[in-house]
Image (cartoon, rainbow, N blue to C red):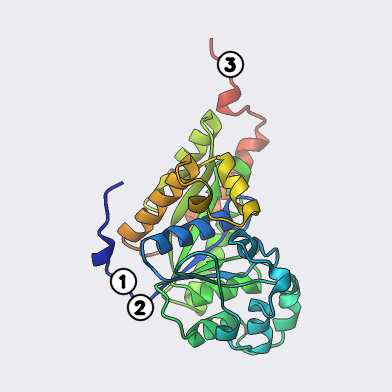
């Protein structure tokens, strides 16, 4: 990874990055937290927006969500001033709009409201702090909260676990991104796909090959490995750079963050038809009953 001169980095007014995956357990929250932490280390002012009712992002930066007075739920449903909800984290340059378990009720509570898709966008526009990056940790679903995140964002980052079942939801996710782009936010782009939880198996290598074939030019070079420290850090309320800055997971997220800063935002979401075919191709693979390549005996 080449060295980046962060002092001369061409900052925009701010970048709003939604980290989204329809499937849970792919490293979505881990990715959001650790990108934010490294951006802060480089001197950027960052805010995390925890849009997941599980509150993992809030807990992952050391905040006890049960002890806070308000959350993003109050902002979305009651128009509470987000500036009164934003709280400091233990880490320099990093703030958070915390989550609440009440977000699980948001679908029904926003259903009859006009402009329900823009509630988060309206809230972000009211924020008085000068942030370089706003990073939204989306829920593992494609409901109204994720629509809000896409309508408010400039970019979407998609974590994909290096295993076959994690790939099947991508076609639907990209379909929703295209829909939001066409109706609510024509500035929205997919910044890229990050491969997570990589292990040195033939299966993982085959997944990487297939992902690059179906998403040419959209896959980050950095691959996040399976790493015990990455799994342990959230339980301590710490980003990986504060828990074990020299482990493989930390070095990978540092490289990914540099890649996000260095690379140009990828324009134009690729032809939908190729994405829609993706999940079916993998289903067909499993339906054949053929063993994965790593299971085939070699003589």
Residue drawn at 35 percent across, 55 percent down? 258
Front in this rendered view, residue 162 or 60: 60
Front in this rendered view, residue 161 or 287: 161
The picture quadrant where one finds residue 149 is bottom right
Front in this rendered view, residue 202 or 296: 202
Judge depth for marks 3 and 1 and give the one in front. 1
CA distance for labels 1 and 2: 7 Å
Judge depth for marks 2 and 3 and give the one in front. 2
Residue 13 circle label: 2
Residue 208 circle label: none
Earlier residue among tags 3 and 1: 1
Residue drawn at 53 percent across, 59 percent down? 33
Rate crowding at label 3 as few (under 14), some (14 to 19) or many (20 or more) other CA atoms within 10 Å: few
Residue 52 is situated, as x and y percent measured from the top left of the image, at 65, 66
Earlier residue among tags 2 and 3: 2
Report which residue position mark 1 lands on: 11
């Amino acid at each position: 990874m080449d060295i980046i001169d962060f002092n001369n980095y061409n900052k925009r007014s701010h970048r709003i990055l939604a980290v989204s995956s329809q499937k849970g357990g792919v490293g979505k929250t881990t990715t959001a937290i650790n990108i934010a932490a490294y951006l802060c280390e480089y001197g950027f002012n960052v805010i995390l927006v925890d849009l997941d009712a599980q509150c993992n992002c809030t807990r992952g930066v050391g905040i006890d969500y049960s002890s806070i007075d308000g959350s993003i739920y109050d902002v979305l449903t009651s128009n509470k001033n987000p500036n009164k909800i934003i709280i400091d984290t233990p880490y320099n340059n990093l703030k958070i709009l915390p989550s609440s378990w009440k977000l699980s009720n948001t679908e029904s509570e926003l259903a009859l409201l006009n402009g329900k898709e823009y509630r988060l966008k309206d809230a972000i526009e009211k924020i008085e702090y000068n942030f370089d990056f706003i990073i939204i940790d989306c829920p593992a679903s494609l409901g109204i909260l994720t629509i809000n995140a896409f309508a408010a964002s400039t970019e979407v980052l998609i974590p994909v676990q290096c295993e076959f079942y994690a790939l099947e939801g991508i076609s639907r996710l990209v379909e929703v991104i295209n829909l939001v782009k066409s109706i609510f936010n024509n500035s929205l782009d997919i910044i890229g796909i990050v491969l997570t939880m990589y292990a040195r198996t033939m299966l993982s290598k085959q997944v990487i090959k297939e992902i690059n074939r179906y998403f040419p030019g959209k896959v980050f070079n950095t691959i996040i490995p399976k790493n015990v420290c990455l799994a342990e850090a959230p339980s301590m309320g710490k980003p990986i750079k504060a828990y074990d800055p020299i482990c493989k997971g930390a070095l990978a997220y540092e490289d990914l963050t540099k890649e996000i800063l260095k690379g140009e935002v990828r324009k134009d979401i690729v032809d939908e038809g190729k994405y829609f075919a993706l999940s079916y191709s993998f289903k067909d693979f499993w339906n054949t009953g053929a063993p994965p390549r790593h299971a085939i005996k070699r003589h």
